[in-house]
Image (tube, coloured by chain):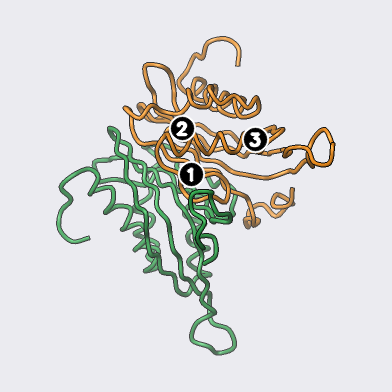
Chain colours: A orange, B green
Amino acid sequence: MSGGARTDTEAVEQANTAFYEAMERGDFEAIADLWLDERHGDVSCVHPGWPVLTGRGEVLRSYALIMANTEYIQFFLTDVKVSVVADTALVTCTENILSGGPAEDGAELGPLVGQLVVATNVFRRTADGWKVWSHHGSPVLAESDDEEDDEGAV
Amino acid sequence: MSGGARTDTEAVEQANTAFYEAMERGDFEAIADLWLDERHGDVSCVHPGWPVLTGRGEVLRSYALIMANTEYIQFFLTDVKVSVVADTALVTCTENILSGGPAEDGAELGPLVGQLVVATNVFRRTADGWKVWSHHGSPVLAESDDEEDDEGAV
């Protein structure tokens, strides 16, 4: 994340990383800053297992809610693929998530849960850098025919 | 679906409808025609509960596989929202799916299954019309705080 991005692909990958790092820090302001301004288009967001959320207000409220219920979250991103066409970028990645809820019964942290999620993130180029137009995350439930390992069982 | 599309939004909505109608007909050629040509960018696809599929070859093979295992499928689309910015369009919709697998034990059709899926579909404008750049479908598992009805239980 240090240094300037040389190519569009690198700049998009940095924005994508920053998006997950902001979640890890529980940094609501950074998340709000990374989502596209409404002047540039309507944003949409699907969290794993959720219905579609539309518009900055609804999307940002969901992040406030998730952050309030998440004591700890870490994303190990794999399979990051970036495709840039003109001012739009499509990113797919696998989010290997380790998270914990608020503590119960005097413990320091709630139980840690591992989760395998795949995401499609669409970015728009703006004067202020690449911004998130759409995020869609979903749980990996089944094994594909190509990958018969334990991918669905984290 | 009849008549010409007057606005970009209408044209994109028609392409989105055509995409699901092709699935309903089991029309592989139409599906292949609706996915973006590789000259215009790398396509990606996430079927509900699946990992990410990348590139036309992998994506189209998955449709051939799904069609081979689907005797009957019908999509009732609701909450269709279209956002067009320059040559890219973002569509979100709820796919209320009714499907049946191949017949067993001499029955005409396998058991019908209802499924609630939300999708984010990204389209690119080409000389040959709007084409699918990315499709991400995911099961709705939980209820959001805003909608405490029976949305998760189809």
Q: Secondary structure at mark 2?
A: strand
Give amino acid for label 2.
Answer: Ser
Image mark 3: chain: A
Return the residue at label 2.
A83
Whether discs 3 and 1 lie on one chain: the answer is no
Alpha carbon separation for disc pair 1 and 2: 10 Å
Between A48 and A153, which is closer to the camera in this rendering? A48
Eyeballing the image, is B102 above or below B11?
below
* Mark 2 closeness class: few <14, some 14–19, many ≥20 residues within 10 Å: some
Alpha carbon separation for disc pair 2 and 3: 16 Å
Q: Residue furthest top?
A: A3
Q: Give residue B24's position: percent from left, percent from top.
A: 39, 67
| Residue located at (61% from left, 29% from top) | A23
Image mark 1: chain: B
Question: Of the numbered discs in the image, which one, if any, rests on residue A78?
Answer: 3
Earlier in the chain: of badge 2 and badge 3, it is 3
